[in-house]
Image (cartoon, rainbow, N blue to C red):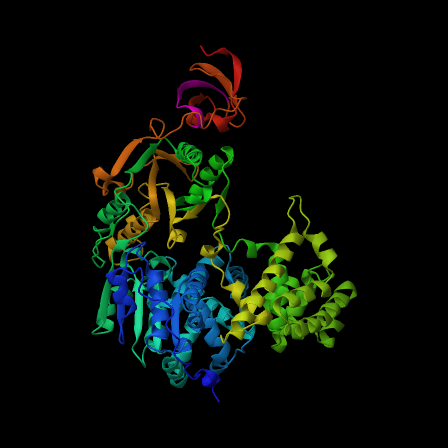
Amino acid sequence: MNATGDLFPSAPAAAEPREDLLVGLNPAQRAAVVHGAGPLLIVAGPGSGKTRVITRRIAWLVRERHVDPRRILAITFTNKAAREMRERVERILPEAGRAWISTFHALGARILRREIEALGGWTRDFTIYDTADRAGVLKRAIADAGFDAVQFRPAVVGGWISAWKNQGPEALTGLDADPDDGALQTEVFEAVRQRYEATLRASNALDFDDLLVKVLELFERHPGVRDAYAERFEHLLVDEYQDTNRVQYRIVRHLASRHGNVAVCGDPDQSIYGWRGADIRNILDFERDYPGCAVVLLEQNYRSVNSVLKAAQAVIERNAARKRKDLWSERGPGEPLVVLECENEDDEAAAIAERIAALRREGLRGRDIAIFYRVNFLQRALEAALRWARIPYQIVAGTEFYERREIKDLVAYAKLAVNPRDDVAFRRIVNVPARGIGDKSLEELERFAADRRLTLLEAARSSELRGRLRGRAKAGLEAFAGLALKLEELARMPAGLALRGILDTIDVHAWYAELATEQEVDREANVEELVAHAEAWEEEVQERRAAGEDLRAGLPGFLEEIALVSDADALGEDADRVTLMTLHAAKGLEFPVVFVAGCEEELLPHARAIAGGDSDDPEAGIEEERRLFYVGLTRAADRLFLTHARTRRTFGAWSFRAPSRFLAEIPDEHVRSAPAEDDEAVVLGAFQAPPEVPELAPGDRVEHDHFGRGVIETLQGRGANARATVRFPAHGTKTLLLQYAKLKKLGGAAR
């Protein structure tokens, strides 16, 4: 019997009414919630309560339409959003929490855990490779194909493969655009892709793209499997539909093919992931794809004051690829946006930190404030200024914890326990802690495995192979092969117990000793944090399984959970810290006060978009950059600051910067502009020059640690913005921020 044979539970009895599910909804929200059968497009402006609509609709279907919650599928884009959606549904109607609510990738993993064996080559215990795992496989594949991994970097080749998987061969037309090396790039792509795919299959592993691509392949190669899931899900709800790529689009079409009850929610004006395959046409063409669909516009904004909304609306209306809507709010007019012009990036960072210090003195908490930027290199100056001002901050990077060496080591042990074919995990831990297995022994092991078409673990267990080794390497490999048998026993245990069992099995003290560094990093505490997380996760999953949810528990389920962590899942909402993040990571979030730094041409919009990028439509890139700016503006609830610099260091050189064209698109009545150092919002003295900075005047002779001796020509600014223009005979004229320059005043004035 097909694994989907257990997917058709009998419908529960209708729940007794407990509350009016329509209380507090505006007319448009109510119309979306009570929509009956057939397709539905919900065009939801920022801050318009779309999560409330989706969760109330799920509860409405269960209570009023008597739909079995297990026949409802709701898909969103981050673990955090899925978790919040599930919790809100359970608060409204506990039994409705049994609906399938997940991300696209989690849904793909869940389906493939049941069905992947139909594709051949994989078992249900497949490993999900993260970015670092993929890079390791690609590096070896590039070398095995006879190419240089420096010239053809794994990240670049990996991007080609990802585009090919998600968008098809047409995504790679740019490889042939360069007549000098286009043919070579195509050769590299084909050779490496084949080796990469073969390695994944041999290792019983999938990458993130495969979690979607393999589901689509499964549905199209096995219509019976597709039909079973399409029949199972009587109602399908898709959040953030504007961010779907063509693979996700086709999966949705398959799942909606039986009942046609597909409700999608999104906003074309917030489609900002075209660079990773999102296709705005999916939402713009929804009415054509699903004839007769109902359309609901959610235009009332519950987040922002009207000055923010009017400014954002004026900007986004310049885009052609959109669905018209008019945002409005009952929160009042609000304060004008503040546009700050700064001398350079250090001045910009100092001005932002100075205003944050003033806002905190007004009573705002750090968690109420966010700084957004288009490109990551702006983060350096911002961090320096916040540290100098002693303002606590957090950088949103959800995968950072899982990139730590000790965490990756322990996770690799767990992966090998669950999937003994995982050669990437084997390579990482075969000599962790040290077992005397050097590079030459590993090369011998890999040759032996390749010649006999064995996994590395199978080769390690071979007495023939161990007979070729000597000394510590032989003993170490034999010990590791025995340890791996114990790992396989642990794979069947609850996640937390399994991780503790792994720590008991390995020489944990030797491992911690090897991990010791000059930095005072508490490796043991990090490991304990992972184990505690596994125990808490296992407890939650067991509770949900007891309530009737069909979830994967144990170590395999936990590995899947942490493999799907994204940056947006890591925001520390309980930490009273200012948040720093890219504009792309900010979507879906909101803060009382927002700063958008680097509002300059070639940054926002990005230089690639200005140059036309890879699109046939030169305006498509600018429109996406405008949508990104729009997303940044609409994260602000109360106050919004937009900053730009007149000069900025790029690639080691100073360059003059033009303000972003998007700033000029904001009507003057919604903006208050001023040079950063003169703005009345600045609380002078929030930064004072450090005591060691000497009193300086034009004409003074000074010495700099790097540039040597020079003469001050001019002095400008105050406090954190104080800077000097200094002429150095050996290096020319430099503009230096005094708080960082550490100039030493020399006796006598220049003649």
Look at the magenta stretch and give its main secondary structure: strand
Question: Residue 31, position in %: x, y?
Answer: 25, 66
Which image quadrant is residue 363 in?
A: top left
Q: Is 175 included in the stretch rendered in magenta?
A: no
The quadrant the C terminus occupies is top left
Residue shown at the point (64%, 71%) measured from the top left: 417
Depth check: 83 or 58 in front? 58
Q: Can residue 715 be seen from the camera position used here? A: yes
Residue 494 on image: x %, y %: 62, 70
Q: Is residue 717 magenta?
A: yes
Q: Looking at the picture, how far across and down is residue 387, in whole percent?
A: 51, 36
Q: Is residue 731 above or below residue 440?
A: above
Viewed as shown, does residue 536 lie left or right of 39?
right
Residue 408 or residue 290, whichever sits in front: 290
Q: Is residue 564 above or below residue 645?
A: below
Magenta residues span 709-720
